[in-house]
């Protein structure tokens, strides 16, 4: 049975802030940050925008594209985020009520740093493929935080992406998946702390590159595909440099990655890096750390 995406939608704050404006406040060297992170500006949530409001709008856009899907047909709603507005109360229940999907629906929130949205997609995909539900909604949404003056302040941004997954009326199929998991503490936030911490350069080689290279290589081996078989390749984007570098290390060309390379003008939206992908005669490879 072919399972894939039936509808998709995104929602992004209108506001943007440039790297120069942040650097000006701290007396920092803006050109160094722009060159080091390959970032120019990022999205900034308005005062009335949080993970729930962004998720609602993205999901409504997804339902509008999946015109044949009634919200009441959604058998599961999962919201993945590292910045849920409530410590105790799921974002998914508010989302489900707003969409008119309740009460016959399973709901859960996911939290897994930058890959919570893809985890939600993976679980919905499994439920549809196993025949437990007909359609499911997976959302990745974040209003990411960075401590004042920290490098994350220049990149942490906001947005939401929603995907309705099913087995009919497909706009794209999910042909295969692969997970590579280790406990690599490059990014974390303890309870009661307002801002996450990171291990600086440790985030690069032992964390991002090891994980993405291992997952991508294993998936290519599993599917017996090579970089030339793909129209587009999209890799997790904590900054502008990492995804392009890891893609080239794997043998992908810049033209294959340019379409999904959004972070220089959007910032690191964390759980949602998969808004705008279109495949023609070949395949799309999407990899998250």
Image: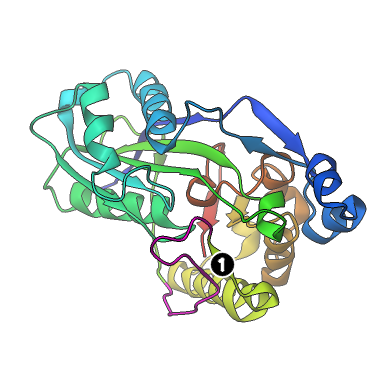
Magenta region includes residue 233? no
Q: Position of residue 152 (x, y in %)?
A: 66, 57
Q: Quadrant of residue 41?
A: top right
Query: With respect to residue 16, does 281 lie above or below?
Result: below
Q: Position of residue 225 (x, y in %)?
A: 53, 65
Instruction: Say what secondary structure mark 1 lies in.
Output: strand
Whether residue 136 is visible to the viewer of this picture, yes or no, is no
Q: Residues within 10 Å of mark 1 (few under 14, many from 20)?
A: some
Q: Residue at x 75, y 48 (%)?
A: 255
Instruction: Judge from the rendering whether residue 100 lies leftward or rightward of residue 175; answer left or right.
Output: left
Q: How many marks?
A: 1
Q: Residue at x 66, y 45 (%)?
A: 267
Q: Position of residue 158 (x, y in %)?
A: 55, 40
Q: Residue furthest left?
A: 104
Magenta region includes residue 181? yes
Q: Position of residue 78 (x, y in %)?
A: 28, 45
Question: Looking at the image, which is closer to me, 1 or 31?
Answer: 31
Magenta region, main secondary structure: loop
Q: How is the image coloured?
A: rainbow
Q: Quadrant of residue 57?
A: top left
Question: Looking at the image, which is closer to me, 49 or 103?
Answer: 49
Q: Which residues are magenta?
A: 180-195
Residue position marked by numbered label 1 in the rendering:
197
Q: Residue at x 23, y 30 (%)?
A: 96
Whether residue 112 is visible to the viewer of this picture, yes or no, is yes
Q: Quadrant of residue 56?
A: top left
Instruction: Judge from the rendering whether residue 179 lies leftward or rightward of residue 280; answer left or right.
Output: left
Question: Looking at the image, which is closer to me, 270 or 150?
Answer: 150
């Amino acid at each position: 049975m072919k399972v894939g995406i039936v509808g998709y939608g995104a929602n992004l704050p209108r506001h943007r802030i440039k790297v120069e404006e942040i650097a000006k406040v701290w007396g920092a060297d803006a050109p160094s940050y722009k060159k080091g992170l390959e970032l120019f500006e990022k999205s900034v949530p308005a005062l009335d925008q949080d993970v729930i409001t962004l998720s609602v709008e993205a999901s409504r856009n997804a339902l509008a594209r999946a015109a044949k899907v009634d919200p009441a047909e959604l058998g599961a709603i999962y919201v993945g985020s590292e910045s849920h507005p409530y410590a105790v109360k799921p974002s998914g229940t508010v989302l489900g009520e707003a969409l008119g999907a309740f009460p016959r629906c399973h709901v859960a929130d996911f939290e897994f740093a930058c890959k919570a949205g893809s985890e939600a997609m993976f679980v919905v995909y499994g439920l549809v493929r196993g025949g437990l539900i007909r359609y499911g909604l997976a959302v990745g949404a974040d209003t990411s935080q960075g401590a004042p003056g920290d490098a994350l302040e220049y990149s942490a941004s906001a947005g939401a992406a929603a995907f309705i997954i099913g087995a009919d009326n497909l706009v794209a199929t999910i042909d295969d998946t692969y997970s590579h998991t280790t406990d690599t503490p490059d990014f974390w936030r303890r309870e009661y702390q307002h801002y996450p911490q990171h291990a600086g350069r440790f985030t690069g080689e032992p964390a991002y590159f090891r994980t993405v290279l291992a997952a991508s290589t294993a998936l290519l081996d599993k599917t017996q595909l090579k970089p030339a078989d793909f129209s587009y390749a999209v890799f997790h984007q904590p900054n502008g440099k990492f995804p392009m570098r890891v893609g080239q290390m794997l043998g992908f060309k810049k033209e294959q990655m340019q379409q999904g390379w959004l972070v220089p003008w959007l910032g690191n939206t964390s759980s949602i890096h998969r808004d705008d992908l279109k495949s023609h005669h070949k395949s799309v490879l999407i990899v998250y750390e």
